[in-house]
């Protein structure tokens, strides 16, 4: 898999602007001609489709230029992080088709970062501030007005050193004091106005336990970690553009007199992946999971990679989608339909074609022998002859889709109706009885449809070429089919831009995020059908098998499926029906 992806990446025809910048750096001899990237997720939730774009960039750029991409967990906030997320992140990266060179953690550098912070205090570049968070925020000023200096900004170095030590012994409660870098309170860049670089967090860390009480902030840990590891190209999303000068400044400070010249990490930024009808904030996704609005992080309606995997998306389709939308220096809202189109395009090449009836009505072929069973040949995938064939049983009584029959049909109805002919997939031409087309129950609902077949028209026989006006219908044998549960998934949110809609509802109704989410959820995001039938061939289908239910859509086997209770998830329909809605 990894070799295939490396070939796929290196054979790509056009370069995005990040790759152009890397090539320029290589031509100029920066970093000794090395390319080393990193993917730095925080282990505070599961990866979502937005992370897939960053993964493809970080790992793809390294692969294209013969470099290495390391995985580094940004584990500087122990209150939200967990080993569960660490393992899930690793699984998702590998499923997407990538493998990291080395596995690192920001916590690997806690001692080095601490020593660096002590060095800054001694050099007069950092101080302990005992103001509240609100006071510090007020003194920051605005983008057009300079900030005001903290009354603690010029406290003695020895005093700051002693207090910094106490921040890490458990003597200082959370929020009581912070360590700030002393830069420039009048800088037009708000991030330079004495940023907080350490705070107290009295919570056990998933790797270091209770060894640390003072933890570095992201801006302080990120660039230094890149420097410690030898990262050459630190690829970030656009919100980090104003952070770049601070990133560079801290790298300059940590070099401790070393002349870096062109041997230093360079930060480049690209746009995030934004999708309509999708909410990707980890904070909001966590609410959905904890409050039971979805069935876990891998609910197929979730935008998480594990959710897409369970729903039946292929890693290739996601990588192809990311490649199609590309990388730019401005944010845009992408249409979810484009992602679904990439999924259809990919699954069309790899999905096994099978028969399944989701809303069944019985079809009786009155002139077919009662105890006769024929094994007909079905092609697994017309797009790939090497996928071979399988057999499907055909008999007198079949299940067909309820909406493939109409007792009183308009002229343009090309399916089964009194006196009309249709072809059964891989089988015969049948004609609906004109005198007694169907039986109904007491409520007038059709229970059985009657027809006759032409024995000379089986697929592959000379009579199969007989032209008819009706369509080709799919079916399964009543006696040789398996009952199944089918889950039809659709978009989770009614709003095209759920993030803005969430904020609007909260402001208008003065409610919390949970209540606003309940109002926004699409009531048709999941429909469960329990009276479905599939062909016996699917008895051995496994989770993550890619299937096409003919004439219906793409499906896969859910992880909850068992031999005695088959469960299938709809991945995507054969056509885009959401846009019409």
Image (cartoon, rainbow, N blue to C red):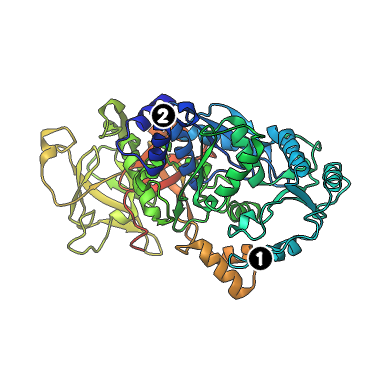
465 relative position to 257: left or right: left
Evaluate whether residue 1 shows in this view.
no
Residue 428 percent across, percent down from the top left: 20, 40
Residue at (64% x, 73% y) in the render: 510
- Residue 407 in the figure: left or right of residue 247: left
Quarter assignment of residue 377: top left
Decide: marks 2, 1 in contact (CB < 8 A)?
no
CA–CA distance in space, label 2 to label 1? 44 Å
Q: Residue at x 32, y 34 (%)?
A: 12
Q: Could one spot residue 382 in this view of the protein?
A: yes
Quadrant that contains the C terminus: bottom left
Q: Which residue is mark 2?
A: 65
Looking at the picture, tell me which residue is in the foreground, 75 or 308: 75
Task: Give residue 232's position: percent from left, percent from top.
Answer: 51, 34
Mark 2 neighbour density, 10 Å: few (under 14) some (14–19) many (20 or more): some
In which quadrant of the rendered view does residue 131 lie? bottom right
Q: Which residue is mark 1?
A: 141
Position in image of residue 414 (x %, y %): 20, 55
Viewer-nearest of discs 2 and 1: 1
Mark 2 lies on a secondary structure that is loop
């Amino acid at each position: 898999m990894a070799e295939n992806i490396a070939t796929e990446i290196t054979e790509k025809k056009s370069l995005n602007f990040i790759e152009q910048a890397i090539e320029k750096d290589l031509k100029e001899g920066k970093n000794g001609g090395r390319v080393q990237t990193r993917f730095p997720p925080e282990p505070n939730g599961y990866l979502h489709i937005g992370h897939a774009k960053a993964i493809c960039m970080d790992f793809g750029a390294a692969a294209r230029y013969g470099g290495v991409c390391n995985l580094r967990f940004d584990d500087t906030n122990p209150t939200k992080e967990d080993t569960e997320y660490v393992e899930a992140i690793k699984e998702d990266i590998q499923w997407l088709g990538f493998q990291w060179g080395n596995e690192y953690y920001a916590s690997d550098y806690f001692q080095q970062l601490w020593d660096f912070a002590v060095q800054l205090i001694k050099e007069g570049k950092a101080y302990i501030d005992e103001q509240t968070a609100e006071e510090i925020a007020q003194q920051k000023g605005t983008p057009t007005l300079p900030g005001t200096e903290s009354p603690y900004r010029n406290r003695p170095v020895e005093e700051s050193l002693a207090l910094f030590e106490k921040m890490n012994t458990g003597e200082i409660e959370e929020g009581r004091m912070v360590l700030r870098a002393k830069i420039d309170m009048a800088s037009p860049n708000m991030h330079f106005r004495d940023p907080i670089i350490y705070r107290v967090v009295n919570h056990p860390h998933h790797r270091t336990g209770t060894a640390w009480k003072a933890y570095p902030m992201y801006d302080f840990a990120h660039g230094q970690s890149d420097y410690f590891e030898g990262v050459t190209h630190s690829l970030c999303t656009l919100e980090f553009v104003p952070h770049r000068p601070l990133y560079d400044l801290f790298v300059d400070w940590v070099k401790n007199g070393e002349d870096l010249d062109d041997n230093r990490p360079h930060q480049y930024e690209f746009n995030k992946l934004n999708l309509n009808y999708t909410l990707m904030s980890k904070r909001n996704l966590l609410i959905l999971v904890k409050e039971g609005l979805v069935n876990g992080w891998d609910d197929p309606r979730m935008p998480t990679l594990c959710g897409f995997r369970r729903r039946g998306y292929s890693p290739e389709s996601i990588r192809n989608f990311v490649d199609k939308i590309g990388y730019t220096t401005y944010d845009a809202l992408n249409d979810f339909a484009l992602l679904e189109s990439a999924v259809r395009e990919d699954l069309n090449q790899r999905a096994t074609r099978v028969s399944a009836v989701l809303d069944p009505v019985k079809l009786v072929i009155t002139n077919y022998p009662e105890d006769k069973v024929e094994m007909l040949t079905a092609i697994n995938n017309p797009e790939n002859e090497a996928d071979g064939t399988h057999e499907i049983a055909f008999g007198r009584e079949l299940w067909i889709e309820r909406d493939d029959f109409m007792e009183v049909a308009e002229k343009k109805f090309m399916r089964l109706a009194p006196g009309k002919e249709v072809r059964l997939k891989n089988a015969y031409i049948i004609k609906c009885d004109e005198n007694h087309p169907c039986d109904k129950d007491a409520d007038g609902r059709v229970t059985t449809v009657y027809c006759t077949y032409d024995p000379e028209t089986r697929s592959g026989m000379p009579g199969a070429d007989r032209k008819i006006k009706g369509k080709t219908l799919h079916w399964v044998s009543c006696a040789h089919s398996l009952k199944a549960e089918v889950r039809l998934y659709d978009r989770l949110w009614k709003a095209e831009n759920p993030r803005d809609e969430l904020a609007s509802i909260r402001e208008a109704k003065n409610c919390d995020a949970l209540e606003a989410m309940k109002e926004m959820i699409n009531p048709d995001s999941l429909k469960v059908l329990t009276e479905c039938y599939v062909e016996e061939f699917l008895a051995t289908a496994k989770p993550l098998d890619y299937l096409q239910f003919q004439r219906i859509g793409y499906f896969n086997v859910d992880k909850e499926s068992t031999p005695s209770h088959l469960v299938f998830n709809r991945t995507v329909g054969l056509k885009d029906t959401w846009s019409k809605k």
